[in-house]
Structure formats: structure tokens, C-alpha cells
Image (cartoon, helix red, strand yellow):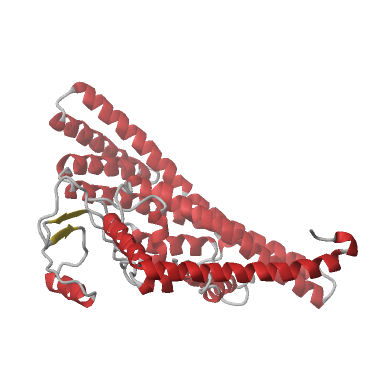
Amino acid sequence: MLDWRGGPAAAAAEVLPQVAEIAQELQALELELREGARRHGLHHAAGTMERIDWLRQTAQNIRCDGRYCWITGWTSEPNVASLEHALAAAGVRGRATLPEPPTDVAPPSVLRPGFGQRPFEVFAQSVGAPGPGEADPTTWVALLVPLLFGYMCGDVGHGAVIAIAGLLVRRLTPAWPLLVVCGIAATGFGLAYGDVFGYEHLIDPLWVRPLDAPLMILAVPVGFGALVLTLGLLLHTVQSCWRGQGRSEGVADAAQLLVYWSLLAALVWPVALWGAAVGLLLCVGNRLWTKRDPVAVIAGVGHLAESTFSLLLNTVSFARVGAFALAHAALELVVITIAEGMPGILSAALVLILGNVIVIALEGLLVSIQTSRLVLFEFFLRFFEGTGRRFEPAPAPPATGMDYWARGKG
């Protein structure tokens, strides 16, 4: 029994020795259990069971006849000699063969991103891995994301801050290259806008100042969006060819692109509407050739109208890229105006620093969300399904014997 009448200090003085005594007893019991396990060979059994479980999880099929075992699975190594060398290095006596893959099982997708593309895999992974007959969009995402981000956050100073922040957190998150690349892109567009922390008189713009030409700032992303959507449709056509559907799907995509671009061109050149009529006839002819059913023709025309309307809406949605660029310039103008109205230099400097920090944090969050939205819902929607599974190399087999205890398993 503990006597609590002496107060907290007395109670702690009485409890601490008992806690230390219990800890010593637990340590002694653990050592005793380990000795018993070693004496009866439990460490070998536990390690062996772990290896059996590892084989069960990693090997697709195992067959044994008493002396030999056949283990089948997927590999990304096309060279048999390299596989056998790796087996020998791991202490495994065996031979490797590369038979024809089974036709009733979908193979995993081996993704080999190029230099600097790995951080951008997060966009495709949020949907899934590309399946058989699907293009890996990582290369295109690595181009689109910096361009969209930089256009919306074009500022030499802000871009440098974002890039430096990425370098500072490189040990905290694997996504740090995204910050560096997007920061560099923002710096480049800042030079195009002639913008340094909102000040537009420090350097001459290489292109145009956003607030001096707002219509142009809005129109350029819309044109860029049309190219992005067209790229998505072209990738869909390529995938259709890989799947053996190139003739029907390719003609349907061609009709879609012809109608889409004819309607866009008709905004400045009305005679281009004839191209939309040709695209409609191409859609009808394709349906008659492949389905030979009037109902299918009506369904095809309806699908063409719906998808064209969707494309036009998605194209207009890219105007938000220009809107954010204008909003950035306007926010920085507000910060500078407030700072110039402050009574002293220190107070003006404080407003400039805090204002830019708030703008960088707020815009960084909002622009990242908008960039992700445009990539996932406007670009990926045209071709990427993510129905595959990523090829993941099997982990090394667990240790057995005394190594099992060295890993603290006992």
C-alpha cells in the first residue's frame, strides 16, 4: 500500500524505486525467454516461418518435387544472365528462365520516369497506375505543372523564395523537387512579366505586364488549354491503336478534333464552321461503317455533341490560369500601396515582408490546387484511366537464425 499523506513528492519518492524494480524484473524475464528460445531453437523456427510467409506473399506460384522448386513471378529484368547473377549473389542455387507471360493475367506496369520526373508521379498515382495499353502521363505532367504554376505565380522574388524553400525542406519531404521546379518556373514568368515582389519598375518585362494587357493574359491560357486537351485526345488515339481499336476510335477522335477546332476557329473566322459539318459527317460515316445501325448513329452524334460541349467548357476553365496571374499582380499592388502609405520605413518594410509572406502562402496553396485540378480533371479525363498496378520489386527475404533476434523479434 502507498501512503499518500506525505504529499506528491513523498509519493513519487515511494513509487520510483518500485518502478525501477519492476523494470529490472521485466528485463530479467525477457532475457530468460530469449535463452529458452535459443535453447529450444525457436529463433530458427520463427525465422523460417517468416521466410515461408515471404515466399507466400511474393511468389505467384511455387511447385516442388522433393529436390527442386519452381518459383514464378514477374520481373523487369530482360536478361537471364543478370537474374542468375543476382540469385548467386543472394546465395540461391538456381536457374532463371523467361517464358511467355500468361494471357489470363494482366502484367504489372514497369514505370521508368526520366530525369527529374519522379516527383511528378504523384499526379498519376492519385488516379492509379497506367494499365496495359495506357500511356504514362508523367512526362507530360512534368511539363504542364511548372508552366501552369509559373504562369499563375509569375514573380522573380516569389519564385526564388519557393525554390529556396524546396531546398530547405529536402530532408523532410520527397516532394521538395516540385517546389524547386515550380519556383524556377515562377521566376521565369516573373522575368516575362517584369515583376519582382510586386515591383514592376525594377526590371523591364520580357513579354508583357499582366495589368497592362489583361485580355491577353486571359486569352493565352485558353489557347494553351486547347492544346492540352488536344494532346489528351491524341494520346487516347494512340492508346486505341495499342489496343487494336485504332480504326474506329481514331476516326471518332479525328471527327471530335475537327468539330472542336472548327468551333474555336469560327470565333475569328466564321467560315471554319464548315469544318464542324465535315466532322459531323465523319462521325456519322464512322458509326455506319462500324455499327450499321441507325440507333448507333444517333447515339454517336449525341456523344459527339456532349463531348464537344465538355471540351469547350474545359477550354474556358483554363482562363482561371490567367485570372490568377491578374490576381497575383493586383494583390502585390495592394501590398505595395499599403506599404507606401505607412508613416515610417520600418513599418513599410514590415508591411512588405508580411504582405509578401501572406501572398506566397495563400497563392501557393490555391495555385497548387488549381494546377492539380486542371491536370487531373481536364487533361487526364481525356485518356488516363489508371486501371493497372505498379510493378514493385519484392523485398529482400527476412533473416533467419540468430539474425532474427538481432532485429529484436524475440
Along the line of sight, the residue nearer the viewer: 316 or 162: 162
Q: Picture coordinates of residue 295 (x, y %)?
A: 23, 22
219 or 80, nearer to the observer? 80
Q: Is residue 320 left or right of residue 340?
A: left
Look at the picture and state if 274 lies above or below 189: above
User: Which residue sits at x=17%, y=32%?
Assistant: 285
Residue 193 visible somewhere in the drawing: no
Residue 343 percent coordinates (x, y):
85, 72
Residue at screen point 77% across, 70% down: 340
Residue 84 seen in this snapshot: yes
- Image quarter where the C terminus lies is bottom left
Residue 169 quadrant: bottom right
- Residue 56 at x, y percent in the picture: 27, 55
Front-lying residue, 389 or 39? 39
- How many marks on residues? 0
Q: Quadrant of the N terminus?
A: bottom right
User: Residue 62 lies in what quarter of the image?
Assistant: bottom left
Determine which quarter of the picture holds residue 123: bottom left
Q: Nearer the viewer, residue 4 or 375?
A: 4
Q: Position of residue 370 (x, y in %)?
A: 51, 53
135 lies above or below 359: above
Query: In the drawing, does residue 250 fall left or right of residue 147?
Result: left
The residue sitting at 62% across, 63% down in the picture is 361
